[in-house]
Image (spheres, helix red, strand yellow):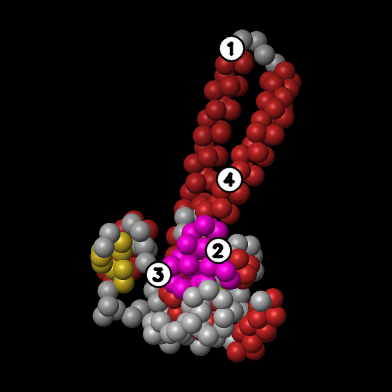
Amino acid sequence: MALPVFDKEEDVPEAFKAIYEERDGKWHPKATEVPDVSKLEATLQKERDDRKEADKRAKKAEEDLAALKLTKKAKENGVTDQQLQEIRDAEALARKPILDENEQLKAENLKVTLVDHVRYLALNFGVMIDRIDKAMKDLAPGPNGRIDRTEDKKGFLVRDAAGKVTAETVEDFLKITYKKECPFFYKGSGAGGSGAGGSDGDAEEAPATNSAVMARRNADIAGAL
């Protein structure tokens, strides 16, 4: 199973920096190093959780400071505690629609970014143009999609056929694993459709997957074609 590739050095977990090197503007695992992938996954998750918690604490500190400044100013101007609370409640009520709209827009933008990215890569790695829409229903987005955003929304993750998150990169998954699971979506598969004829000769051996789950998935997808 391939180790992840990082865009920046600071994204590489501290415990694993010694086994990574910069190539072509990104940070790749050194070819001679084969560490325990499960340990790397656990380290990555811990760093994501720590970063998320630190962001929460920083935001809370900013809000507390703003509240203290407001209270001090109110006291200086003779505003009672009850009046101050009424002001805060009114402000919160006025902000809620704006915050809700911002969250909705943020979620929609992330979804568009994910779909566009996966679609581009899938086409680049040989998925046929007339079958890309059907493939995308299986790939992303959503809780059951094979490709999704990481929890911190800064990267992408891949799930296996059983729905378990793996350490495989999106590129390797689309080029190797998914091509083996669903060859009828790809050029050179002999399954018909634009670009289906011939053989591209680039297929590599994919990691083993749950055969029963894969068989059901293939049957569902093939029936939709």
> Mark 2 or mark 1, which is nearer the start of the sequence?
1
Q: How crowded is mark 4: few (under 14 residues within 10 Å), some or many (20 or more)?
A: few
Residue mark closest to the camera, 1 vs 2: 2
> Mark 2 or mark 3, which is nearer the start of the sequence?
3
Q: Given the image, on which type of amino acid does mark 1 rest?
A: Glu
Is the stretch drawn in magenta largely helix, strand or loop? Answer: helix
Let me know if residue 142 is in the magenta part: no
Residue placed under numbered mark 1 in the picture: 76
Question: Which quadrant holds residue 96?
Answer: top right
SS at badge 2? strand
Residue placed under numbered mark 3 in the picture: 4
From which residue to which does the magenta span run? Answer: 114-132
Residue placed under numbered mark 4 in the picture: 106
In space, the residues marked 1 and 4 are separated at their CA atoms by 39 Å
Residue at the spot 46% in from the left edge and 73% down from the top edge: 126
SS at badge 4? helix
Residue placed under numbered mark 2 in the picture: 148
Residue 52 image position (x, y, % from top left): 51, 52
Q: Given the image, on which type of amino acid does mark 4 rest?
A: Lys
Residue 190 image position (x, y, % from top left): 53, 85
> Mark 4 or mark 1, which is nearer the start of the sequence?
1
Q: Given the image, on which type of amino acid does mark 2 rest?
A: Asp
Let me know if residue 124 is in the magenta part: yes
